[in-house]
Image (cartoon, rainbow, N blue to C red):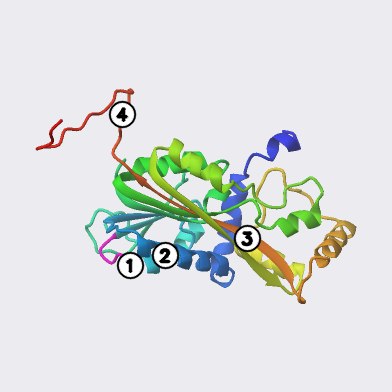
Amino acid sequence: MSQTEAVAFVDRRAVACRFARAAADYAQHDFLVREIDRRMLERLDYVRLQPQRILDLGCSSGGSFPGLLERYPQARLLGVDIARPMLAAARPARSGWRRWFGLDGTAPDCLQAAAESLPLTGASVSLVWSNLLLHWLDHPLPALAEAHRVLEVGGLLMFSTLGPDTLQELRAAFADGYAHTQRFTDMHDLGDMLVESGYADPVMDMEVLTLTYDDIDSLFAELRGAGSACAMHARRHGLTGKGRLQAVREAYERMRSAGRLPASFEIIYGHAWKAAPKKTADGRAIIRFERGARP
């Protein structure tokens, strides 16, 4: 596989391994995840929805669980993630599927699965919530389509992900032809994917958050601690030489402002609804008749 061909593909094993290693100390490095989670929860203030079942897709260590359950105390919550140690941190004392089917209280359950192939029946959840997952996938479309499948009619998908300007300073400092960040999807492309997946009334917006660091090593440490180091196949697989790393440090130093090194994160937010289908699976139009309606 050439570097040009590989740049389009995520090393899924590396993603799972890195988040697994990060699980034990994740809470010390997940500031950005928690801040975006808070901003997503604020967006629910403008949504009229009382979900009975919530799917947290890419739940990591369950950081979204408290906010979701506080807002929807009667909902049953299922967290799905690809990294088993993250799920263990999210739900240390699990009781299986009894809670999911309403047999044993309302505490969250956790399930290890891939976002593109969920072991859930169709139309089984009211809200699919996903905070900073999509950029870890080869392509967002299969996961968006799968979320649409498991949503009930009238259900809501709400997600966040990182956009193309994320860590632009780091890419500029390396500038060596290798991948040093994930491949990030443009907001408008994500909106098109929502429509292609069958969602109705998609809403997209974005903002750029700039975090600052004392030095580049602090940035590297935080990315590693959050499981967020580059996991593209086209990354450099060997060690970076001292001379090359020194050149990167010098390039990044030229971006220092007010005594700090900046790191940009383009945050994309999206939500959309699952409307009643207009066609059957074989392409025939569905015509609905309402009682009392007149031509």
User: In terms of secondary structure, where does tag 4 sit?
Assistant: loop
For mark 3, does the 10 Å Cα neighbourhood hold few (<14), some (14 to 19), or many (20 or more) residues?
A: many
Relative to residue 240, is residue 249 depicted above or below? below
Q: Which residue corresponds to the image point at 83% horizontal and 64% vertical from the top-left? A: 249
Query: Can residue 93 be seen by looking at this rendering?
Result: no
Relative to residue 140, is residue 257 depicted above or below? below
Q: Which residue corresponds to the image point at 87% horizontal and 60% vertical from the top-left? A: 247
Which of disc 1 and disc 4 is earlier in sequence? 1
Task: Quickly name the residue at label 3.
Answer: 265
Q: Which mark is residue 41?
A: 2
Task: Quickly name the residue at label 1.
Answer: 71
Q: Are marks 1 and 2 in contact (CB under 8 Å)?
A: yes
For mark 4, does the 10 Å Cα neighbourhood hold few (<14), some (14 to 19), or many (20 or more) residues?
A: few
Q: Which residues are magenta?
A: 71-75
Q: Is residue 21 located in the magenta-colored stretch of the structure?
A: no
Task: Quickly name the residue at label 4.
Answer: 279
Q: Amino acid at mark 4?
A: Lys
Q: Which residue corresponds to the image point at 28% horizontal and 56% vertical from the top-left? A: 51
Which of disc 4 and disc 2 is earlier in sequence? 2
Residue furthest out toward the front = 295
Which of disc 2 and disc 1 is earlier in sequence? 2
